[in-house]
Image (cartoon, rainbow, N blue to C red):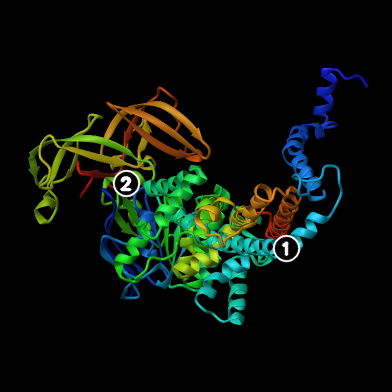
Amino acid sequence: MAILEVDSITNSFGSVTAVDDVSLSVEAGELFCLLGPSGCGKSTTLRTIAGFEQPDSGQIRIDGTDVTPTEPNRRDCSMVFQDWALFPNKTVRENVAFGLRMNDVATAQRRQRVDETLSLVEMTDHAEKPPAALSGGQKQRVALARSLAFEPEILLLDEPLSNLDRKLREAMQLEIKSIQRETGMTMVYVTHDQDEAFTLADRIGIINEGHIAQQGPPATVYTDPTNQFVESFLGTTNFITCEVTATTAVEPATPEATDGGTAEIELTTPFGEPLSVPAVDRLSPGDTVTASIRPERVSVVTASSEPPASWLFTATGTVEQRLHRGSRIRYELAVGETTLVTERRIDERLGVDIGDSVAVGCQPEAITYFDAAGRRIR
Amino acid sequence: MSVTAAGLRDRLQNGELRGLLVAPIVLFDLLVFVVPFGYLLRISLTERTQRGAFVEGSWSLEAFQYVLSTPTLIDSFLFTLWFAAGVTALSLGISLLYAYAIWRAAGGLRVALLGGVLVSMLTAIVVKLFAVQQLFAPNGVINQGVLATGVIQEPLALINSAAGAVIGQLYIVVPYSVLAIYSVLSSVDESLLDAARDLGAGRLRAVVEVIIPHTIPGLIVAGVISFTWSVGSFAAPLLAGSSAERTTGIAISDLLQQNFDWAAAAAMGLLVATTVFVALAVTYGLLSYTGGGTDG
């Protein structure tokens, strides 16, 4: 059963709608990531779950109980803040004990629980220090311990690692993941860093402009986006602007079409080769359709060799740029009136130089189409 | 050793003559504080006389004996201590609430609250006390308002009474107190309050547990300001109190102007100053104990 249910909450501040009809549900023991660009409403969503913001409409349920009107101190969840918000006048031990003390846990039990939690985050040696004497990573551990100590049902994390440098951040991601496995704690984790989200999440909700663009397991969201925002937000991609030629072209092009196969609409592309999308009612001639091919899925062969027959299209292009970026090489190819970007690992480098003529294409499953409103066409 | 400009500069840069850099402050302190204070001390140690302010060139402890054996002066001194302690306690309470309100307010409201403090601080004391008289008089706005509610039948003696003296003095010290506390509070991260609430603390408990410990340095400074100023209070008890509220300030003024007894006035002044010094020394001890007012 879902331990946390967010039921179409909307939050406005003046004329700005920060959260617009967001619904999600989180299973017990699950790590759910809210991923989105800054200012998309993911932090407001989290603060609404914690009880610091009141939604204009909608409901929050924890364990099936409506907690929407409940004060933050009476909700069975705890938040790890972006700036950690450790109490500067208290030692590490007092910080971690705070939640237990507020929840009237007896002294002996409290001591034991604090010791356990400090050892879980490997901060036992620093128990008597004030937060000011700790490094960023250590403060992070204390903040985590402080929220874990009194065993809330749900742990809310608001970009907890964004103040750490990259190496430490990656180490802490793994640590949070292992603590989550060890304790079985349900976590809702807000981040703008997609690598972090993909590393940690059991499921991801991608937020854009206050609403959830897509949610699901990380792999599904990446490979099977339902809209153009998700496709563009998760990593880089090549967007190719195409135009619907004519809806009269809608005809069963292949014999399969008669037994449930798809009718197709033809598109003109900036690189000359036509493409086609499944026929949908919302397209009419002159409409714009955006095709997307991930850089790693753009196929390239030298002009002299024969392109594979399995390619969806074959266009001729010229190598414009070749950039070495650490373990990867990035090629920019001028194809017709557009530029396609592709990437190869060093050991899979293409044997081409700047100015070389190449054949460019892709496998049929490598390409996704979106209509002018950003919706996936399939 | 030759005293050339370049040589002097070198020696300053080497730190040899670093002591010279504090010379202006030392000079200022000497002229403005030590010299007048020494003068006061000297006068307090002269013989009292009926035929002038004091006997020049004489040495005597007579003035101190007089001050310490005159019941009205002792009463005045004890009253002043109580008065200052009461004003300090009230000032701290009011200022803490007000500073907290500024801290929690946002945008225009914060500016308005801060502005209110500054306007009050920059208003001349006499003008302020005149306003207090109007506001708290038996036929003033406040008394008329409370009378209209029917809670009381007779106007309250909020002016020309002990209450009046305290209210008047609060009008003087509270703005400074508020700023002292707010300056510390403004450095506190508001998310601490959220964190405390999140961990199960109720609204009041969150403030007491997390915010108050932070404001202690500010509270101490506010306390010092309120107490020292009230020990030396003169205008508020004079203009808003009755003749019963005779603070040392008023007593000294009477000694100077009515009795023309400068030796006794100086002795009384020294007693008050010593009290303030002791209070400051205790506070300094407290400050060092809590970490010198910095966030630890």
Answer left or right for B185 relative to A195. right
Nearer to me, B256 or A12:
B256
Say which residue label 2 marks.
A231
Which of the two marks, 2 or 1, is nearer to us in this view?
1
Above-or-below relation of A43 to B54: below
Nearer to me, B296 or A372:
B296
Q: Position of residue B82 (x, y in %)?
A: 62, 65
**Quadrant of residue A29 within the rendered picture:** bottom left
**Quadrant of residue B12 within the rendered picture:** top right
Distance from label 2 to label 1 (Cα)?
Answer: 91 Å
Answer left or right for B216 relative to A218. right
Q: Which amino acid does label 1 sit on?
A: Thr
**Quadrant of residue B25 within the rendered picture:** top right
Q: Which amino acid does label 2 sit on?
A: Glu
Q: Where is residue A82 in the image (x, y as percent from the top left)?
A: 48, 54
For the question of whether residue A358 can be seen, the reply is yes
Both marks 2 and 1 on one chain: no
Look at 32% across and 75% down and name the residue there.
Answer: A65
Nearer to me, A268 or B217:
B217
CB under 8 Å between discs 2 and 1? no
Provide the chain ID for the residue under circle 1: B
**Count of all numbered marks drawn on residues in the image:** 2
Query: Is the N terminus of chain B in the top left, top right, bottom left or bottom right quadrant?
Result: top right
Above-or-below relation of A161 to A327: below
Q: Where is residue B131 in the image (x, y as percent from the top left)?
A: 43, 49
Specify few, some or many for label 1: CA neighbours under 10 Å numbering under 14, 14-19, or 20 or more: few
Say which residue label 1 marks.
B70
Q: Farthest residue toward the left?
A: A248
